[in-house]
Structure formats: structure tokens, C-alpha cells
Image: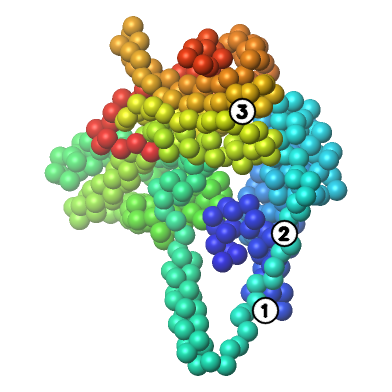
Amino acid sequence: MAEELWRRRDFDAHRSWLAVDPNSRQGREARRRLSRADQRYREGVRRLERGEPGARDALLEGVAIAPMDPALYLPLARACRARGLEVRAEDYYKKFLRLRPDHPQAPAARLELGALDPELQGIFEPEPSQTPAPAVPIRPPPSVSLVPAFAAGAIAFAAAVALFARLFRRGLPLARLAAESPELQPSIAYLVSSVRHELLKHRIGAIGDAVRALGKGEATAEQRAFLAARLYGGEPLVLAWRGHVRAFERALGPRLDLRRADRGFREAGRAIGRIAALERALAAGDARAAERLAWAHRKLLELDADLAALATRLVRTTVDEVLLEEVVREVRSEYAAGRVELDALVIGPVAPGVSVEVFRFDLVLVLKNVVRNAILAVGRSAPPRRIALDVGVELEPTGEEAVRVRVRDTSTEALTTEAIYERRVDRGLGLVTAALTRYDGAIEVEAGSQGWAKGVTVRLFRALQSSSGVAS
């Protein structure tokens, strides 16, 4: 169970690993792996502090072994801040303060986070009357004397063992990992783009005409030479393929299993191996080799098509009630925003079937900043304290449709569009403008109406419907 928390990237995974009975075989193994991972994590932090190469590789090696001690998020945050990576530093400060609110360095960390972004001051203050619950050792249940109870427990235990055996037999295929971990989607999209451009398009897609001509026995000398250069010239195809697969695994962590769990990558690996083995036979004009090459070529084109569809889904997010509720829930879980007593928080109306070409993780980040700002603003104002979110679509003069996500509030604090854009790009609503710029979006403040003091609107262009009609 503790390992499953780690596979799901649960923030409490490290504490759960320590809670496994240290006298058990599993407990000893957990501590051995935690110790090995801790060495790699600390090495990565040291390299980052010194500006030495290899910091990312060391950290990823730790990720592949065991969860990180949350106490290390603080030196990691400070190292990022010292290197000018302020956005990344802010994220690590937040993780540290969520998981170690009573750490001796927590007060200093809150001050440092507040210096990075004054709008976050007080958000991660701990509850005065609460302390984190101590880790409870995970031990086998005591024996019971009643035979029926023992039998029922044995059956339940056997079922649990069978379930976790299925869970741990394989990791996740790429598409499922992308669906379960929105924060990884930008990295996945980059990796997909790299393998498609550098290998599947440049080396595999380019030989389509030559492969078809070879299969018909009509390939010219120029086509044969071109095919040989693309498949067997330069870096060996097998090594290029392995490099891309390892890049996926290093960047995305141990939950990903391309070699066993992902059918598309598994078959593509077989196709790459087959192409590598055909070099001499193709040079000799073997007709059967041409047939095998056509099969391998087809399998690799199928993977390319699947990856293209996945990339489209990743950058397409549906703007619906589920998304807005997730944003509100995450903001309300924060200390300062959660302590603001609202008279009302209304979601809707929401235009149906609206999607934008924005990574879900980025869109959630943008909307969380806008909603957090509104909640904290009404908390500083006199009642009534009300917030409302809605989504509409407007037709632009260019014929494009603009999706407008509006957050209205009753705060009397002055806020203008110009003031938002003048803020530093690594702080609060300034982060919103920086993120929206990447997607050709905008943010604007509009005058209030019907009982609202103002509204802050995030505008993005509506995504065109794909042929498959699938949205993430």
C-alpha cells in the first residue's frame, strides 16, 4: 500500500514508507531503498546549488528508487531560487510547507516564500491547534481465536494480495499515465514531439515511397540508396530508439512501463529490431526482407499516428463544471483561502462542449491564481463576501470563438487590467499573464454589475473539433 502511494505520487508516500513495520522484510527493504534514494536526491541538490551538470539526472535516479524526504524540498527550493528559477522554487517551498509545517526551518521558509510572492504570505501558516498526525506503524493484525473471523480475514487478505499483485505486475502505458498525471502532460507532449520529429518522421516516415516501391519490386537505385541512408546511416536505429525510450523513462518516472505495459511501444520496439536485422538481406535484394520491412514500417507508422492523437488530446482541455470545481476545491484547501468565510460561491452557467488548446495543468494553475486572488480580496473586504465563476463563448470579428472564464467577486479593492500586466511575471496574477501568453490568451478586469464589484476574465480561443471528437 505504501508503494502504491509512491506510484501515485502521493505527497504522504515517504511517511507511509517509514510506517511499514521496520522488523518486517518489507520494512527493511523500504528503508534500504529510502536510504539509496536519499543519497541521489542529496547529490542532485548539491549539484544544483553549485551549478554543476547532472543535477536533474541525480534527482531522477532518486525518483526511480523511492519517494523523497519532504524535508529536502526546502534546500531544493533554495537552490532553485539561487539559480534564478523562482517559479520552480515557489513550487518546492509550497510542497515543503504543506508536508512539514512544523519543521524548525518552516518559519524561515514562509518568509522566503513571502519574499518571492507577497500574495502567498500567510497561506501556508499551520493551524494553531493542530499538529500532523504521527505515523502509525503498519503491522499485521493480531490473531483472533474465532475460526469464522480468521477465515474471513484470510479471504480478505488473499484478495488484497491478488489485487496488489495485479497492480504491481506492470507499470502504466503512456496514455494512461498522461490521463492520471496532468502535471506530466507538458513533458509528455515534448517527448512525443521529439520522438516523432527526430525518428518517426525524419527516418521512418520519409521512406514510405521507397518501401512501397521495394515491395512491388520497382525500387530504383536512388530509392534503395535513400532507404539505406535513412535506416542504416548515422546513428544506428536501435540506439536512437533506445535513447528516446530512456528519455521517456527518465523524465516520467517509475510508473511508466513502455517496454511491457505499452502495446504500441512494445510492437514498435520489435519493428525497430526487425529493421536492424534486415540490412544485409535488403542490400542483397531479398524479396522476403522487403515484406518484413513493410510490416515493420507499418507498425511504426501506427505508433506515430497514436502519438499524434495523444499529443492532440494532451493539449486540449474541456472547460466544464468538473474543472471549475477542481480549481475551487484546491484553492479552498489552502490555509489562508480556506479560512475566508464566504457567503456564497457559485459555479455556472457553463457553456456546454467547450474546449481550449491548453494543457489542463496550466489551465488549472491559471484559474487557481485568479480564484485565490478573488477569495483573499473578499476576505479583506466587508460583507457580503461572494464569488461566482461562469464560462461563456463569444464570436470574434475574425470568425474565431473566444472562451471567456469569468470570476466575479464583491471585493471593493481596486484592480485594473493594466495593474495585472504590470506585476512581476513570477508572482501571483503575473504568473497568469505569463502562462496565457504561451497560448495566445489574455486576462482583463471588467466593471461589476448585478451586485458584483468586478469580474476578472480569462480569455482563450476555442479549440476546433478534431475528427475524433476526443478532448482531454
147 or 207: nearer the viewer: 147
**Residues at discs 2 and 3 in contact (Cβ within 8 Å):** no
* Callout 1 amino acid: Ser
Residue 435 to residue 143: above or below: above
Residue 196, horizontal then vertical, whole percent? 39, 38
Quarter holding the N terminus is: bottom right
- As helix, strand or loop, the secondary structure at mark 1 comes to loop
Which mark, by number, is residue 341?
none
Is residue 293 visible from the viewing direction of this image?
no
Q: Nearer the viewer, mark 3 or mark 1?
A: 3
Residue 367 to residue 153: above or below: above
Q: What residue does disc 2 label?
A: 133
- As helix, strand or loop, the secondary structure at mark 2 comes to loop
461 or 144: nearer the viewer: 144
Is residue 275 visible from the viewing direction of this image?
yes
Q: What residue does disc 3 label?
A: 375
Q: Nearer the viewer, mark 2 or mark 3?
A: 3
* Callout 2 amino acid: Ala
Q: Nearer the viewer, mark 1 or mark 2?
A: 2
